[in-house]
Amino acid sequence: MTDDTRSHPFRDSVQDVAATHRIPDTPQTRAPAYRLAFTDTDFLMREELRPVRLQLELLKPQMILDERGIRSTIVLFGGARIPRPEDAGTARTPMLAELSKYYDEARRFAAMMTVRSLESYGRDDVIVTGGGPGVMEAGNLGAHEAGGQSIGLNIVLPHEQAPNAYVTPDLSFNFHYFAIRKMHFLMRAKAICIFPGGFGTLDEMFESLTLIQTRRMKRVPFLLFGRAFWEKVLNWETLAEAGTISPEDLDLFQYVETAEEAVAAIDSFVTPCP
């Protein structure tokens, strides 16, 4: 930061952090209390600082995406265990092997949407995934193959996890809070695409549907890839028959099977009147 770019006349934080590296080494300057609060990791990890950590986790991706000029995204949710078609023979279950076809559909769909995104210089229709393996990898791979950028919203889990190799490096984010991560998935969403998956995918799907159903989020194309899978997992009609949802809630989503069908559904979507 230079004096010309600052909006205030005060000395900036970068200068003061640099100055702390030149102070005398004394018992006082070595004490934790003397550290600048915003550089003191031990202080920031205190239980009382959770509201600050929540705010930081909201602000960091928001600011970076704003700086990159990204206006809208196409969200891909789906299972981390869905194998590549060439690896279907080593899948842990026959059904997972069958579901490997959706890896290819996610890859092709992401490539098709990224070609469109490039028409807006990568500002609109940017693919965003959870940044992990399976369907997430397929989405980032498709965007990469099309020559565009894509976003990965990873999260720290107890077992080892790293972003897949196809997320645009400076759009690869890591989260501690699931809630803030899900907010970033939806804040710029122009369409939401749900591929077969497990608990995480179901959680993301139902939270998104709930926000739309309760009008906390505007209607966008909501596409479920693989009708046979989803109708086997969930009996939507029973919810409507029982009255736990309204019959019109079944219109909040639609089934698709291929990348082409998904693109057509997005293109033909008409925002309902409020």
Image (cartoon, rainbow, N blue to C red):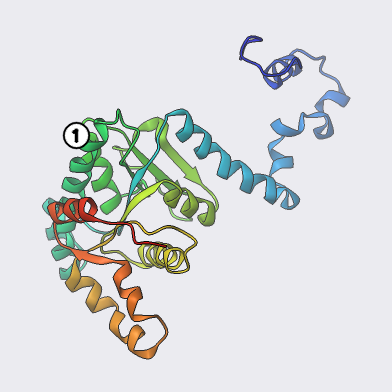
Identify the residue shown where x is 75% and y is 51%. Answer: 48
Residue 20 in the figure: left or right of residue 167: right
Q: Amino acid at mark 1?
A: Ala
Viewport quadrant of the C terminus: bottom left
Image quarter of residue 121:
top left
Image quarter of residue 125:
top left
For residue 46, say whether it is visible: yes
Which residue corresponds to mark 1?
146
Residue 12 position in % (x across, y down): 71, 18
Residue 101 position in % (x across, y down): 13, 58
Q: Answer above or below: position of 226 versus 218.
A: below
Residue 51 position in % (x across, y down): 69, 50
Q: Nearer the viewer, residue 9 or 25?
A: 9
Identify the residue shown where x is 35% and y is 44%. Answer: 73
Q: Nearer the viewer, residue 228 or 215?
A: 215
Of all residues, the one furthest to the front in this rendering is 273
Identify the residue shown where x is 47% and y is 54%. Answer: 182
Q: Nearer the viewer, residue 127 or 153?
A: 127
Q: Secondary structure at mark 1?
A: loop
Residue 162 in the figure: left or right of residue 177: left
Q: Answer above or below: position of 194 versus 114.
A: below
Q: Answer above or below: position of 143 versus 159.
A: above
Of all residues, the one furthest to the right in this rendering is 28
